[in-house]
């Protein structure tokens, strides 16, 4: 497998940070540029293998995705492997990557992700 990809003509290194049967989450870091600085320089790519879709996040959305991945992994005491997949499905649909904002008020995040 190649360890780089191109986004808008710029070359990026790929670092896989999460893998399941449905999703891959990869960190993308620019490693070759010869034009003006692009808007996307560093961020995360979500690959949905079931839907054959790819989503790019950067800036605050990438930070929120990273935080949520750590939060869910740390709160996962039941060791449910599909817990992060459930979060990704909701996050992609709502375009909101902070786990605390995905669930309705009145239900705590811990209850919602377990």
Image (spheres, grey):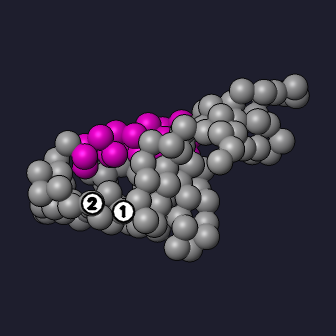
Left or right of 16? Residue 13 is right
Label the magenta part by its dominant secondary structure: helix
Task: Please provide the residue range marked out in magenta.
Answer: 57-73
Give the image quarter of residue 70. Answer: top left
* Foreground pick, 39 / 20: 20
Give the image quarter of residue 35. Answer: top right
Q: Position of residue 85 (x, y in %)?
A: 36, 62
Visible residue check, residue 54: yes
Left or right of 108? Residue 10 is right
Q: Residue placed at 72% from the left, 27% from the top?
A: 31
Visible residue check, residue 102: no
Q: Are marks 2 and 1 in contact (CB under 8 Å)?
A: yes
Q: Which residue position holds label 1?
A: 85
Q: Nearer the viewer, mark 2 or mark 1?
A: 2
Left or right of 39? Residue 98 is left
Q: CA distance from mark 2 to mark 1?
A: 8 Å
* Foreground pick, 82 / 44: 82
In the rendered image, residue 61 lying in the magenta stretch gets the answer yes
Secondary structure, mark 2, is loop
Local crowd size for mark 1, using a 10 Å CA cut-off: few (<14), some (14–19), many (≥20): some
Secondary structure, mark 1, is helix
Q: Residue placed at 17% from the left, 51% from the top?
A: 76
Mark carried by residue 81:
2
Q: Residue placed at 65% from the left, 34% from the top?
A: 13
Left or right of 14? Residue 62 is left
Q: Residue placed at 57% from the left, 49% from the top?
A: 45
């Amino acid at each position: 497998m190649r360890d780089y990809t191109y986004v808008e003509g710029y070359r990026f290194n790929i670092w896989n940070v999460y893998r399941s049967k449905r999703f891959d989450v990869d960190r993308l870091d620019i490693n070759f540029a010869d034009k003006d600085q692009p808007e996307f320089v560093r961020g995360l790519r979500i690959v949905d293998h079931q839907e054959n879709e790819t989503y790019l996040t950067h800036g605050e959305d990438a930070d929120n995705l990273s935080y949520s991945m750590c939060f869910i992994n740390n709160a996962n005491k039941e060791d449910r492997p599909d817990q992060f997949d459930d979060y990704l499905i909701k996050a992609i649909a709502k375009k909101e990557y902070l786990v605390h904002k995905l669930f309705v008020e009145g239900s705590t995040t811990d209850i919602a992700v377990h």
